[in-house]
Amino acid sequence: MEVALRVLQIIDTLGQGGAEALVKDTVPRMRARQVDVSVAVLKELKGPFERELREKGIPFLSTAAGGVYSPTHVLSLMHHIQGFDLVQAHLFPAQLFTPLAAMLVESRVPLVLTEHTPQHRRRKKWLYQLEAWMYSRYTAIACASEAIAASLRAWIPHVNQKITVIPNGIDVEKFQQATAVSRASIGIKDGNCVLLYVASFQPRKDHGTLLRAMARITDVDLVLAGDGNLRAQFERQAESLGIARRVHFLGCRNDVAGLLKMADIYVHAPTFEGFGIAVAEAMAAGKPIIASNVPGLAQVLGEAGVLVPPADSVALATGIRRLIESPERRAQLAGAAMQRSRQFSIENTVDAYIDLYSSVLSTNNKIADRMLSQTETSAQLRGG
């Protein structure tokens, strides 16, 4: 693009999740491609992702004080939106506040939504009209997986023509070439097999099933990277199961690539998942993977890992034990995972989003030209 395209990306927070990782990884690369991207977060956390973007000189626009659900964010977004050629929203409530702000200032700036999950608590009949209005205000909707796209089509069929699938991407080389974190630094006993799960502590990530599976396996350490409101609950569960010494709660980390290199097996055990960026990272790190057999993860993992029923601690424990007992199977899966990870390159994702921006702006300009032409024709008729 000859003239720098001005894009605003709006997201609830920059905690350590898949949507947040997409913003963290794509924004600097877009700016390197002469796309002038700024970021607005509804609540600043001053965490690793946010610090990384600020250190790279990414402009952050101020938003209202208070929590992410404060409607006063609409006022600040009203002020910001008009200064951009295109606005992209991630997660709820940012995806609601963005079209509200655009409507209130009568903005014609095209809006793009990235849909990150196939399930929402909002999907109730009494909220359908609000949902339908919200999604209809977006010119294009990028879904991180076909499973997400299918779910959205089923919920709001009339947005089908707006939907495109753009898989999330990762820095493949970063995870391939990382140096392993020292096991001793985490307090892991020598000789034990090490499992790793990278996920925030929220209900759908279902750490409880994994902890119950751990209670069925001996000589295994589990490393949990992530944080959240349910962390204390799962720490108590580990104590009650008698496995606390083998479960290591690390909190949020900025060295996930090194943790992956340290681990023997990567486990991802949610009850549902839209894409599974952590699984793609584990694939790039060359790890054998066992994961819940849910649509988003199944599409990302393909044949390069072991899939087990979600919320089934017995099946999960059995799958883990079989991998531990078969070094040959682990090596086979690790090689397949590394090979498959290449299709989730962050460069491919950036290319796809820039292509989407160009398509949206081209369509928007044609609509604007047609409206202008109709206005001029009407004026001529009135004058005649």
Image: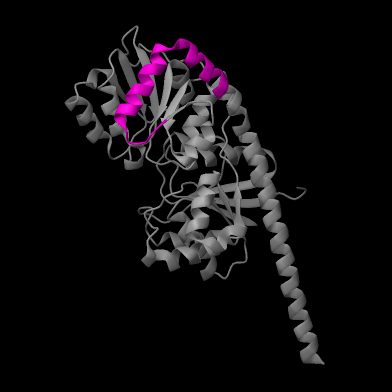
Q: Which residues are magenta?
A: 308-337
Quadrant position of residue 141 = bottom right
Q: Magenta includes 318?
A: yes
Q: Main secondary structure of the magenta part?
A: helix
Q: Which image quarter is the C terminus in?
A: bottom right
Classify 300 as above or below 317. Answer: below
Classify 284 as above or below 299. Answer: above
Please state which of residues 272 and 4 is positioned toward the viewer in this rendering.
Answer: 272
The reply, left or right, for residue 280 in relation to residue 161 is: left
Classify 70 as above or below 320. Answer: below
Q: Position of residue 172 (x, y in %)?
A: 59, 27
Extreme bottom residue here? Answer: 384
Q: Position of residue 112 (x, y in %)?
A: 58, 55
Question: Could you tell me how many numbered marks the image carries?
Answer: 0
Q: Residue at x 71, y 68 (%)?
A: 368
Q: Residue at x 35, y 18 (%)?
A: 321
Q: Residue at x 37, y 13 (%)?
A: 193
